[in-house]
Image (cartoon, grey):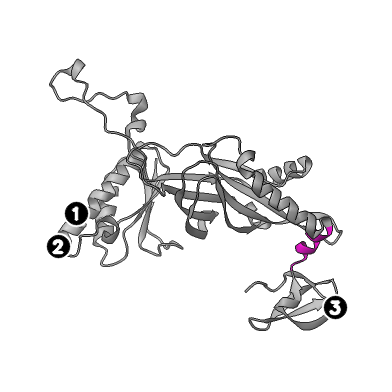
Amino acid sequence: MKYEIGDKIIVLHSDEEGKVVEIINEKMVMIEVRGVKFPAYMDQIDFPYFKMFSQKKVVEKKKIYVDDIRKEKPVARKKVGDGVFLSFIPVFDKDIFEDDVVDKLKIYLINQNEEGYHFTYNLLFSGESNFQLKNNIDGLSEFYLHDIAFEDVSDNPRFEFEFSLVNEHKKKAPFFEASLKVSGKKLFKRVEELQEKNEASFKYELFTHYPDKVEEERVDLSSLGNAGFRVYDAGKGRQHLPPARSVVDLHIDKLTNDWKHLSNFEILTIQLNEFEKYYDLAVAHKQPTLIIIHGVGEGKLRDEIHESLRLKNEVKSFVNQFHPLYGYGATEIYFK
């Protein structure tokens, strides 16, 4: 449904402003204009901010401006390999005093690198998932994600991404996680700065270059002979580790394609090994939390994981409670 009760609208044939007071069906709504209520078809009304934009620019100039920008996009970029960004474009509306106020933010993913990426996107408000999306973004392009109401930014939104290469490369990491958490206060400040500078958008960098695959450290035979030892620089230990995950799904079909012939014991062993692997990586990368998806079922895998967590010194606490994404099928671990 395009409209919701309370939405501001404009009647196209009379140019009068009003609001939606009732949803009649998929094609009609009840609107109120200057205290009078009457039904209207969806194609007879529109949102008022389109009128604002059309008053500021005639249609012909707007089309020429957009076409010019598209042609100049490759030139406008500073350089190839400039990074991946999350861009915010405020959409303004008028308040009762005819002053410009921000109604919502349009969110774009901007890729200024040549390589394309698969991505999984998750928006969280106050720790709870609000919007999810999986898609691809080409090199040197942008991708519209969605809108968020400006009033919702006070809930401290967190934008989480997992990237992987569209064209896999054996020297590149199999996946890469990036996130952005911005307080409502900082977002309000950025919008104020935007208005002062008379600019259209602002952005935050998610990453500059997609990371290389971490190669296994080779034995230094020149210093250790044939002893078989490996030498690491402890200060750079995390650089030699595979990337960690913030969420690990232990359903067996996510771990192997060839599982139907396995016994319950063999399946449980594979799942517990995967849990230990990403638990150790989370500790090594100093993650604050880790979510383990174990499912509900008979609870055997969950019980084994909980028993293991009770014995681990790095665990501050863990909880298996209802989660909006996983129900009761996940345990969230909090590290010291």
Q: Is residue 51 magenta?
A: yes
The span shown in magenta is: 47-55
Secondary structure state at the residue bearing disc 1: helix
Residue to which mark 1 is pinned? 269
Q: In this rendering, would 245 be left or right of 257?
A: right
Q: Is residue 265 magenta?
A: no
Q: Nearer the viewer, residue 262 or 60?
A: 60
Image x and y of residue 110, in percent? 57, 47
Secondary structure state at the residue bearing disc 3: loop
Q: Residues within 10 Å of mark 2 (few under 14, many from 20)?
A: few
Which label was assigned to residue 35?
A: 3
Q: Does residue 109 lie above or below 241 as drawn? A: below
Q: Nearer the viewer, residue 331 or 170?
A: 170
Upstream in the sequence, badge 3 or badge 1?
3
Residue to which mark 2 is pinned? 263
Image x and y of residue 116, in percent? 46, 47
Residue type at the position of mark 1: Thr
- Measure how far apart labels 2 and 1 are at the Cα level: 10 Å
